[in-house]
Image (cartoon, helix red, strand yellow):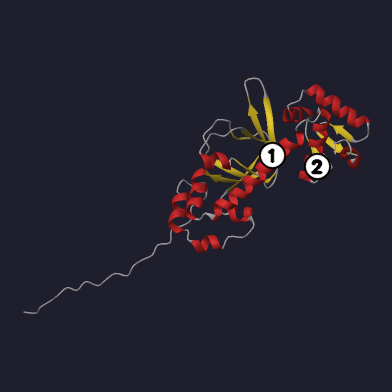
């Protein structure tokens, strides 16, 4: 009788490449944990926005869009790539504009990192493009490679320093001086001699009455320092406007 033996032939291992999910997928953070290595992070560009861009969802919004609401649990943070977003703090009686952010600013990151509710509402002012990062993605990136945390901290530090400087520079100033300072500050930030800003927004930002703002702008316009049009303020005499501020 012939002796027949069965031999097991070992199968070759098959490595299946896991496709990268979109950053807005619920599986994205889990995929990052499984696949990202230190080498991947070392290869990120030095520019903070470009380095973070690959982990974001690029979205474009029309004016009036609410990105998040005051008091909501933080689900995402944003970097403004183009356009403007105003941060609005709502009380029972007042609607105050805390800040108007433009390209390069980040929003909502502190709420995400501290796991506290959004302290204000983010409203799109002009057609705006943002990089949106889910809270899960941010926590995962910081957990995997702390240098990402320092990149976020740079964004946060810039905004906090800007806010601190704003408070210090406006302290003790008259309504007219506050308005002049605001116009100069916005012109410098936007690198433009024309600012797209309605009087109601200016009043809400500086916590002044609409009547006071209208009266002060009228005075500056009669002096030939600015020119007011509907929803716009143009600077006609930059040096003269600067002389209006106390040294």
Vertical placement of residue 166 versus 32, above or below? above
> Tag 1, which secondary structure?
helix
Residue at left offset 62%, top offset 45%: 156
Compare residues 48 and 131 and report the one nearer the observer. Answer: 48
Q: Which disc number belongs to residue 164? A: 1
**Label annotation for residue 103:** none
Q: Mark 2 or mark 1, which is nearer to you?
A: 1
- Residue 86 appears anywhere in the view: yes
Give the labeled residue for mark 2.
Answer: 187
Task: Find residue 181 and report its horizontal and vertical position in percent.
Answer: 80, 36
**Residue placed most toward the observer, 224 or 154:** 154
Kindly state the secondary structure of the residue where label 2 is placed: helix
Quarter containing the C terminus: top right
Instruction: Tell which of 169 and 148 is nearer to you.
Output: 169
Which image quarter: residue 238?
Answer: top right
Residue 80 visible in the snapshot: no
**Residue 221 falls left or right of residue 159:** right
Farthest top residue in view = 93
- Locate residue 1: give its quadrant: bottom left
Q: Residue at x 55, y 46 (%)?
A: 133
């Amino acid at each position: 009788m012939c002796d027949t033996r069965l031999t097991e032939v070992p199968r070759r291992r098959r490595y299946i490449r896991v496709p990268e999910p979109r950053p807005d997928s619920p599986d994205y953070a889990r995929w990052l944990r499984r696949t990202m290595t230190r080498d991947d992070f070392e290869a990120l560009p030095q520019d903070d926005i470009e380095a973070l861009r690959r982990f974001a969802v690029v979205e474009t919004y029309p004016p009036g869009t609410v990105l998040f609401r005051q008091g909501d649990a933080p689900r995402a943070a944003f970097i403004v790539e183009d356009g403007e977003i105003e941060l609005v703090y709502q009380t029972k009686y007042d609607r105050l504009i805390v800040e108007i952010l433009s390209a390069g600013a980040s929003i909502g990151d502190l709420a995400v990192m501290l796991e506290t509710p959004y302290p204000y509402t983010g409203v799109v002012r002009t057609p705006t493009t943002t990089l949106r990062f889910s809270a899960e993605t941010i926590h995962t990136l910081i957990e995997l490679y702390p240098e990402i945390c320092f990149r976020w901290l740079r964004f946060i530090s810039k905004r906090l320093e800007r806010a601190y400087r704003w408070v210090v520079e406006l302290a003790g100033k008259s309504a007219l001086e506050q308005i002049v300072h605001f116009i100069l500050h916005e012109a410098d930030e936007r690198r433009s001699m024309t600012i797209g800003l309605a009087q109601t927004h200016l009043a809400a930002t500086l916590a002044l009455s609409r009547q006071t703002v209208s009266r002060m702008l009228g005075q500056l316009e009669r002096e030939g320092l600015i020119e007011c049009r509907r929803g716009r303020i143009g600077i006609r005499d930059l040096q003269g406007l600067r002389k209006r501020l106390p040294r």
